[in-house]
Amino acid sequence: MAGFFKKKTVDDVIKEQTKELRGTQRQITRDRSSLEKQEKQLEMEIKKMAKTGNKEACTILAKQLVQLRRQKNRSYAVGSKVTSMSSQTKLMNSQMKMAGAMATTTKTMQAVNKKMDPQKMQQTMQNFQKENMKMEMSEELINDTLDEIFDASGDEEESDSIVNQVLDEIGIEISGKMVNAPSASRNKPTSSATKSDGISDEDIERQLKALGVD
């Protein structure tokens, strides 16, 4: 029952019309074939009457032949019209489908345009660009800070290494000189002996300069 009362769509209507037009075209073709047979029969009858000399019968048959040929020509015109109607129906169906597709596309575009605010989108893009720039600046600042920390740590370690090396060398030299130096309990050195046997500030500065430490 539901299928019986189902509303016909445009495609269903066009299919039915196309089917009817095809049936009409076949019927016109059959009628034309029948008219052509009658035309041949009349031509034969007219020739027969002409041989017998029956002029009146020839005239009547000739009038029938003229009407029959007119009817046959009209069948050609009707058949051409039916064919044109069928083609026009198919064309209209195609145009309706195309219009339906355009209507659907238009609705979709309208829905998208309603949801898409150009000003809001522009503001979003600007905010994104601004935040991206902030992130890049923060990243650059962090990298610079880390570089400074690691560079300072490296410099300090290198400086400590140089100082330790200098002190080690000085300590070894002092120890070597202190071995030969007289003990304070045994013999108190004079100022001249201390100056000649000990290491002065000038010696330390000379050692540091030799190692490249200013």
Image: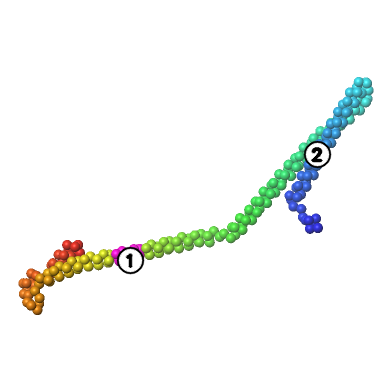
Disc 2 marks which residue? 26
What secondary structure is marked by label 2? helix
Q: Nearer the viewer, residue 28 or 209?
A: 209
Q: Quadrant of the N terminus?
A: bottom right
The answer to whether residue 10 is visible is yes
Q: What type is the residue that disc 2 sits on?
A: Arg
Where's residue 72, x and y in %?
83, 33
* Residue at 6% across, 77% down: 187
- Dominant secondary structure, magenta: helix
* Residue at 32% across, 65% down: 150
Where's residue 212, x and y in %?
19, 62
Q: What type is the residue that disc 1 sits on?
A: Ile
Q: Is residue 207 one of those drawn in magenta?
A: no
Q: Nearer the viewer, mark 2 or mark 1?
A: 1
Q: Nearer the viewer, residue 37 or 204?
A: 204
Disc 1 marks which residue? 149
Where's residue 182, x and y in %?
8, 74
Q: Is residue 147 one of those drawn in magenta?
A: yes
Specify the segment rendered in magenta: 144-154
Q: Quadrant of the C terminus?
A: bottom left
Q: Is residue 2 above or below residue 42?
A: below
Q: Is residue 124 left or right of residue 191?
A: right
Q: Is residue 35 left or right of residue 94?
A: right
